[in-house]
């Protein structure tokens, strides 16, 4: 059984519950499988994925090199290689060349597993700070206060990152330092019908609108230390394009 099939099988059972969010046990089960996945398990060869003017190469389903097995296809600046999607979860791979960026965006009511398969990328992520004296409106277009949860460089091999509906960096942005690929599992996936739309943001320092933070505890506001920021909803940049690539890894057999 392929590693991708094992991941599909564990996701199918772990996310079968009707509960709103996956349990801690379910999350750990999925994480233990995704941690073991390597480039070759999904049909990629790290040593030949060098950046070129038009992107980088992909390999055939057996993940092996050579004149006859390599598929001479070139990715656009950012590619999404779709593996599988159903109501409760989705699986796919984002491939980014050097300097490509996925802007700051959210994952409403979603648990996300991100496994860096190769390369290095900078990750910046925030979580909302909920006001003490008002109800949080997730659909508001006004700037809202958030706290920096992650701001560092990840280099493969590294642990799988997990973000949760209200913690772990639910709003995050990626910038590729080298060509890199990220295997993503979303539970559940985006869905307009269910209110899980992808929203993009621009961040500002807390001091920009510090007077608006009166609904914070005084102690919390004084302990800002540069980690508080305002997030304002924006349209994605015009030059941000994610094109669907061709997944060349082993297919999953849906149950």
Image (cartoon, helix red, strand yellow):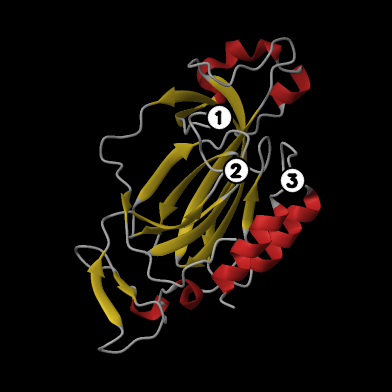
| Residue placed most toward the observer, 164 or 250 | 250
Residue occupying the point 68% across, 13% down = 135
Q: CA distance from mark 2 to mark 1?
A: 10 Å
Figure check: 188 above or below 119: above
Label 2 and label 3: CA atoms lie apart by 11 Å
Residue farthest along the front direction in this orientation: 255
Q: Are marks 2 and 3 in contact (CB under 8 Å)?
A: no
Q: Quadrant of residue 4?
A: bottom right
Asked if the residue at tag 1 contacts the one at tag 2, i.e. Cβ–Cβ closer than 8 Å, the answer is: yes
The C terminus lies in which quarter of the figure? bottom right
Question: In the rendered view, does 23 fall on the left or right side of 54?
Answer: right
- Residue 38's disc is none
Q: Position of residue 7 (x, y in %)?
A: 61, 65
Which residue is located at x 59 percent, y 78 percent?
1
Q: Position of residue 40 (x, y in %)?
A: 47, 78
Residue matched to label 2 = 188
Crowdedness near tag 3: few (<14), some (14–19) or many (≥20) residues, C-alpha within 10 Å = few
- Badge number at residue 17: 3
Of tags 2 and 3, which is closer to the observer? 3
Q: Is residue 124 above or below residue 160?
A: above
Q: How many marks?
A: 3
Q: Secondary structure beneath disc 1?
A: loop
Q: Which image quarter: residue 56?
A: bottom left
């Amino acid at each position: 059984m392929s590693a991708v099939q094992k991941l599909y099988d564990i996701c199918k059972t772990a996310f079968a519950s009707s509960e709103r969010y996956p349990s801690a046990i379910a999350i750990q089960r999925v994480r233990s499988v995704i941690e073991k996945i390597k480039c070759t398990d999904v049909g990629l060869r790290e040593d030949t994925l060098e950046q070129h003017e038009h992107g980088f190469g992909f390999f055939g389903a057996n993940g092996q090199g050579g004149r006859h097995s390599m598929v001479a296809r070139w990715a656009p600046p950012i590619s999404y290689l779709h593996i599988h999607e159903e109501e409760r979860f989705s699986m796919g791979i984002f491939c980014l060349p050097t300097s490509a960026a996925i802007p700051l965006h959210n994952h409403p009511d979603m648990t996300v597993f991100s496994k860096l398969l190769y390369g290095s990328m900078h990750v910046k992520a925030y979580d909302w700070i909920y006001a003490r004296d008002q109800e949080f409106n997730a659909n508001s277009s006004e700037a809202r206060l958030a706290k920096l949860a992650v701001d560092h460089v990840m280099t493969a091999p590294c642990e799988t990152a997990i973000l949760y509906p209200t913690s772990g960096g639910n709003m995050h942005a990626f910038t590729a330092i080298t060509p890199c690929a990220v295997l993503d599992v979303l539970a559940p996936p985006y869905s307009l019908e269910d209110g899980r739309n992808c929203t993009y943001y621009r961040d500002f320092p807390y001091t920009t609108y510090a007077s608006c933070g009166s609904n914070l505890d005084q102690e919390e506001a004084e302990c800002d230390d540069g980690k508080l920021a305002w997030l304002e909803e924006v349209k994605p940049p015009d030059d941000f394009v994610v094109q669907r690539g061709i997944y060349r890894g082993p297919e999953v057999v849906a149950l």
